[in-house]
Image (spheres, rainbow, N blue to C red):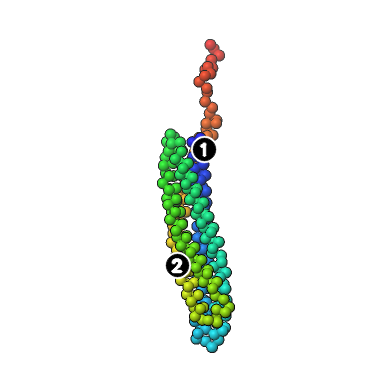
Amino acid sequence: MTTDNTLSAADAVFEAEQAVSRARWVVEELQETITSALRVLDDAELDSAKAKLSERSSFYLEAAGEHLGRLRTRCNDMPELTRDLFAHLNRASQSVTDARTLLDLADTSDLVMASEVAQLKPRIAVVGEMVALAKPFAQLAAQHVETAHQASRDVTAMGLLEPVSLERSIATAGKELGRADEDVRLLGNVVDRAAASARESAGIASEITDNASRRMSEQSRDPITSPSLPAPRSPGR
């Protein structure tokens, strides 16, 4: 049963590594989306400024409105990305908890197994700590993304006729996207550390799985003679 627990612990480590990797992909996609949204916002701000200085103010206001429409499209993608991010982080957290529980039940009477378990425990603990640290950053980023999303929705066709309202919406969206960008960068650093520890943990878990499988294979090939049976007599006696 202890071998089964050890193999189950290794499986949980693999699941944690996959979940952290997927969280890292989402963070990268979220970063790219925010960067793109900031570029669009810069274009909108530029056209909004031109509208005040040019006789073609209606043209530039319309162009600014188009940019803000593109901003809304990008911001519309971000809530789903943050939901995916939390789903992966929560899965990683649960897998780490499962792995640590099962490792406490591992058979450490075998010196090799004991050494591997001793190496794995602190590394999987680091994964758990980094995932726990990532969640507040993810929550802050999600809040700022939602505020920027709301600011982009506040700009309507009628609002384009009011440059002050337009500038206010652009400023609000820019401020919140800037905060989200900073949060996601910090989040990326934390998730990168979690991913590195998760890869190390998965490598050790692979060794544990290989060694456990080899021991079970050796035991199946070398059946133990039952002590209740008499030893075979030699033909000469």
Identified by mark 1, the residue type is Asp
Circle 1: element type: helix
Does 144 appear above or below 17?
Answer: below
What whole-number distance in Å separates the C-alpha atoms at marks 1 and 2?
47 Å
Foreground: 45 or 212? 45
Query: Which residue is drawn at the image coordinates 48% and 44% (left, top)?
Result: 99
Query: Which residue is drawn at the image coordinates 47% and 60% (left, top)?
Result: 139
> Which residue lies under the disc numbered 2?
179
Give residue 223's position: percent from left, percent from top.
54, 27
Q: Are marks 1 and 2 in contact (CB under 8 Å)?
A: no
Farthest-out residue, bottom:
55
> Which residue lies under the disc numbered 1?
4
Q: Mark 2: give few (<14), some (14-19) or many (20+) Cα within 10 Å.
A: some
Circle 2: element type: helix
Give residue 13's position: percent from left, percent from top.
49, 46
Q: Mark 1: give few (<14), some (14-19) or many (20+) Cα within 10 Å.
A: some
Query: Which residue is drawn at the image coordinates 50% and 68% (left, top)?
Result: 147
Q: Earlier in the sequence, mark 1 or mark 2?
A: 1
